[in-house]
Structures are given as C-alpha cells and as structure tokens.
Image (cartoon, grey):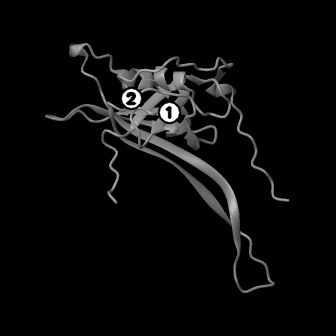
Amino acid sequence: MGKLIPNAKTWVGFAATLSKPTLIPTAGEITSAVKLHQLLISLNASTTGNQVPTPDLSAIYETSGGGTTQATFTADFYRDDLTGGGTDLAWTTLARGVQGYILVSRMVNPPITGTVVETWPIIVIGRTAAALSNNTAQTFTVTCAVPVMPVIGAVTATLLLREGEEAGTLETPAEETVPAEELVEEPAPQPA
C-alpha cells in the first residue's frame, strides 16, 4: 500500500453560491467553480472539538464529554504573472470580505461521480502577501472564518466527466441558490 501525495490528485475550487442547503455541490457547481488548485501551495482546513470535564464525587475516574466544535481555514497561493495573460486569479477571487465555498477533492482531479468532496463555507478575513524576495515566486496567505459547519465527507452524486470523455446528457437539477451569508448553522442534536 502506497502513501498518498496530493500532487496531481487534488482539485480545489471556489463557488460563490451553492444550490443545496446540504452544502453538497452539484456537477454544474463543480464545473463552474473557479479552479484554484493550479495556484495552491498548501491548505490547512480543519475542525477541532472541545472537551468538557464532567467529574463527580461518585468515582475516582474523571469523566469528560464533548463540547463545542470550531473550524479553521488557511491557504497559501501563488500570484499570477499578469504579463502572460494571467489574471492574478487566486488573489482577485479571494479578496478580504469575500464569502462563498471552497470545494476540495483530495483524491480525484477533477471530481467525478462518487468522489468525496469537502465543502468549506468561508469568509475571507485576511489576505496577506508574502515578503518580496529576490529569486522567489510571489505568494500570499488567505485566512478565513468558517461560519457554518463544513461538510467533510460529501459524495458527488451527479455525473461529472473527465476531460475527453463523452456522455449522453449532463443534467444538473435547477434549484434555488443559497448564498453563504443566508445559511444558518443548525443546532446540534441534544442528547436525550
């Protein structure tokens, strides 16, 4: 069994809106997303949980329970060279204050039917250019708030084709678009 490296397997895109409140992207949303993986250096998207101590005097063992969860999101990107027709795509797409969704496929580029895709609802809160340095590519770091619980194991269910493949009809259901700022995190179920 080999070790998985992200090179040539990872696909990352930005979507300003998603049509499903479940945060599972459709084929059309993946196809129309701004492709950022060609400019991506590193991505650190993670969720962490808090542990709440719940000891009592009936036992010598100190118990604990699950508390709240939070997510963090940072990514490092290259700047585009504007002289060759580049648009500085990642820099202009991820300006401070931008809200939307970062879609990540860690195993398949591009995502196809059955691919596990992560959906990270984000608000860009910081965009910091790296120091200018001789003989070094220009880069920048994006820091984002994650206002809604991300979906880490969404499985793409609508057919997506690899470049060069053919199919009869590619249909994406037309559904109401839900902007990121209108999504509301549902409260976690309370134990009975």
The reply to whether discs 1 and 2 touch (Cβ–Cβ < 8 Å) is yes
Badge 1 amino acid? Ile
* Secondary structure of residue under mark 2: loop
* Secondary structure of residue under mark 1: strand
Q: Mark 1 or mark 2: which comes first in sequence?
A: 2
Residue at image coords 44%, 41%: 74
Mark 1 and mark 2: span between their CA atoms?
9 Å
- 99 to 119, vertically: above or below: above
Dividing the picture into quadrants, the one containing residue 83 is: top left
The single residue placed furthest to the left in the displayed view is: 135
Disc 1 crowd, CA 10 A, few/some/many (<14, 14-19, 20+): many
Q: Is residue 34 found left or right of 48 in the rendered image?
A: left
The quadrant the N terminus occupies is bottom left
The single residue placed furthest to the front in the displayed view is: 168
Asked whether the viewer can see residue 98, the reply is no
Residue placed under numbered mark 2 in the picture: 36
The single residue placed furthest to the bottom in the displayed view is: 60
**Closer to us: 155 or 177:** 155
Residue at image coords 74%, 76%: 55
The quadrant the C terminus occupies is bottom right
Residue at image coords 40%, 20%: 92
Dividing the picture into quadrants, the one containing residue 21 is: top right
Residue 108 point in image, percent of width and height: 41, 39
Q: Is residue 55 found left or right of 2 in the rendered image?
A: right
Q: Is residue 49 found left or right of 27 in the rendered image?
A: right
- 8 to 38, vertically: above or below: below
Residue 32 point in image, percent of width and height: 48, 20
Residue 186 point in image, percent of width and height: 74, 40
**Closer to us: 167 or 19:** 167
Badge 2 amino acid? Leu
Residue placed under numbered mark 1 in the picture: 102
Residue at image coords 59%, 41%: 150
